[in-house]
Image (tube, helix red, strand yellow):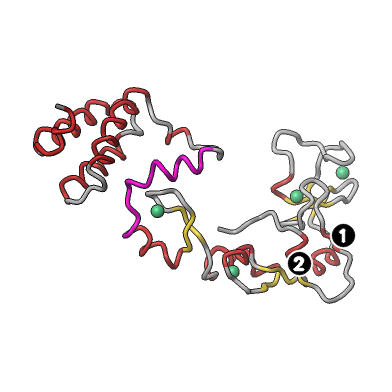
Amino acid sequence: MFEENIDEKRVVTDTNMLLENVICPICYYILWKPIACGSCKNLLCRKCSDKNSNLCPFCRVTFQEQSPESNILSLLYNLRIRCYNSSNGCTDIVSYDLLEQHENLECKYISKKCHRCQQRVLIKNIDQHENLCEPIYRNECLQERSNERVDHRQSIFPMNQFLMEIFNSIFSLGQRPRTTFRNNLYQSAIFNQHHQQNYLVLFWILFKLIVLKPSSSFFFV
Ligand SMILES: [Zn+2]
Ligand SMILES: [Zn+2]
Ligand SMILES: [Zn+2]
Ligand SMILES: [Zn+2]
């Protein structure tokens, strides 16, 4: 997806143009969709304007939005910017006005979260990845990401966690779910663990796993 915070290091320019004229004094990135204060004429990105205050952050007068002067706009439109996905392999350098379109639609190196393991994968590889991505790896992936902020919907409730531990111990003893039967049970358990009310469903899944597959219940005798 398009990255609105454009670091000046991404600007490719062979002139001695001073980038300081096009840096937002609020976010310190390249001005993005800038607006100007009608009173002091200072510029800032629209995303950087304070939604909770109608005062200009620079002169503290009631903010009267103006369009930036045309010389600033032409400086911006002359910028050529390295695609945000360059670390993924994109070598494209795109003009300021086409950057959003490129990064949202045209770039071949857009990444997307795998809905199973939550890792970012290049969009051109996502189908292949998701077909191969085993949901059993999910817990490992979440552990790797535990330092990152985890969406609260992904938090696991104590009863569900307890049931999932039993579940995982069956699967780690039996290794990966080899059959469609076990794989389906595993996937529905993964899905249901995120819903507090669904512990009965988890019980039912465990029951099916243990009772309908005597080889699994062996581990609990
Ligand atoms: Zn800004
Ligand atoms: Zn002002
Ligand atoms: Zn690109
Ligand atoms: Zn994955």
Secondary structure character of the magenta stretch overall:
helix
Q: Are marks 1 and 2 in contact (CB under 8 Å)?
A: no
Q: Which label belongs to residue 21?
A: 1
Residue beneath the point at 82% across and 68% down: 75
Tag 2: amino acid? Val
Residue beneath the point at 26% across and 45% down: 175
| Label 2: which secondary element | strand
Most extreme residue toward the top, as rendered?
Answer: 159
76 left or right of 204 in image: right
Q: Nearer the viewer, residue 125 or 138?
A: 138
The quarter of the picture where residue 82 lies is: bottom right
Place of residue 53 in the rendered image (x, y in percent of width and height, measured from the top left): 75, 34
- Is residue 56 inside the magenta stretch? no
Residue beneath the point at 71% across and 58% down: 6
> How would you rate the neighbour count of disc 2 (Cα within 10 Å): few for under 14, some for 14-19, many for 20 or more?
some
Residue 186 vs 98, above or below: the answer is above
Disc 1 CB within 8 Å of nearest ligand 1 atom: no
Place of residue 180 in the rendered image (x, y in percent of width and height, measured from the top left): 17, 51
Q: Nearer the viewer, residue 111 or 64?
A: 111
Q: Quadrant of ligand 2?
A: top right
Q: Quadrant of the N terminus?
A: bottom right
